[in-house]
Amino acid sequence: MKFPIFLSSLALLATTNISLALKPYQIRGVEDPIYHLYLQALPSSPSTAVMGPEASSEYFNISDTIQSTNTSMLLNIGDGGGGVSYLPLSFNATSGVGPWGLEGDTIITTEGSIYGRELNFLVCPNSVSGYYDLYLQTGSDTPSGETCSNYQTIHLPCLC
Ligand SMILES: *[C@@H]1O[C@H](CO)[C@@H](O)[C@H](O)[C@H]1NC(C)=O
Ligand SMILES: *[C@@H]1O[C@H](CO)[C@@H](O)[C@H](O)[C@H]1NC(C)=O
Ligand SMILES: *[C@@H]1O[C@H](CO)[C@@H](O)[C@H](O)[C@H]1NC(C)=O
């Protein structure tokens, strides 16, 4: 009698751990220059995804998509142009099949996505002070003439 119950709870637990956050979470950086800066839209450009002040942080539903509960916008990965390895993140009301997932508290693109499993990001200062543009880093390229920081990771503040 107990066996089927055990199995279904195990299945639920596995799903929860791999790809599904339980409630809206903030997403933040953990190393300079984005230490405790938070994912949000740039105020002057709602389609630009940036790391910025905690005071203007958005909250996100995280599954295979990352959707702001503040604006309903979805986090998308663009094309850097010219085959560069850093791919700009943006917000848009629409999204294809979501590439996103969680590994512990770390935001990743999943193995099954077109990007494969990636968890490195590049950040470069936005022209608006206090905000950093955010790119998925699929290699090691960096834009010339900018002071960027490579191999950043982004996280939920906790799994609580
Ligand atoms: C986003 O929503 C959260 C939860 O409702 C709220 O605490 C936060 O202030 C909102 N952020 C902005 C920038 O409005
Ligand atoms: C976020 O998830 C909650 C709980 O599942 C849901 O009620 C809410 O509508 C979602 N918000 C968005 C913007 O999808
Ligand atoms: C969202 O993407 C569509 C299709 O590419 C585009 O027409 C639209 O302007 C985008 N919206 C924003 C807010 O960037």
Image (cartoon, helix red, strand yellow):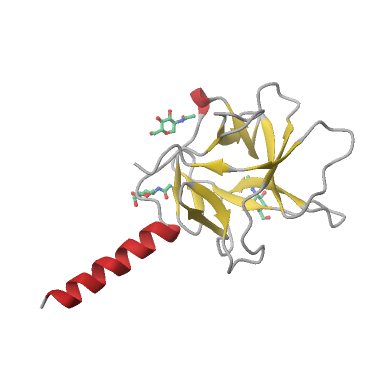
- The residue furthest left is 1
The answer to whether residue 42 of the structure is visible from this angle is no
Relative to 16, say whether 124 is above or below. above
Q: Nearer the viewer, residue 160 or 96?
A: 160
Of the 4 image quadrants, the one containing the N terminus is: bottom left
Looking at the image, which residue is at 51% across and 26% down?
A: 54
Give above or below for 3 relative to 61.
below
Q: Is residue 116 left or right of residue 67?
A: right
Q: Is residue 121 visible?
A: yes
User: Looking at the image, how many numbered discs can be counted on the residues?
Assistant: 0
Query: Between 74 and 116, which is closer to the camera in this rendering?
Result: 116
**Residue visible at 45% across and 56% down?**
63
Question: Which residue corresponds to the image point at 45% horizontal and 51% vertical from the top-left?
Answer: 104
Quarter of the image containing the C terminus? top left
Residue 97: x and y, percent? 56, 65
Across and down, in percent, residue 60 comes to: 46, 44
Looking at the picture, how far across and down is residue 24, in whole percent? 40, 43
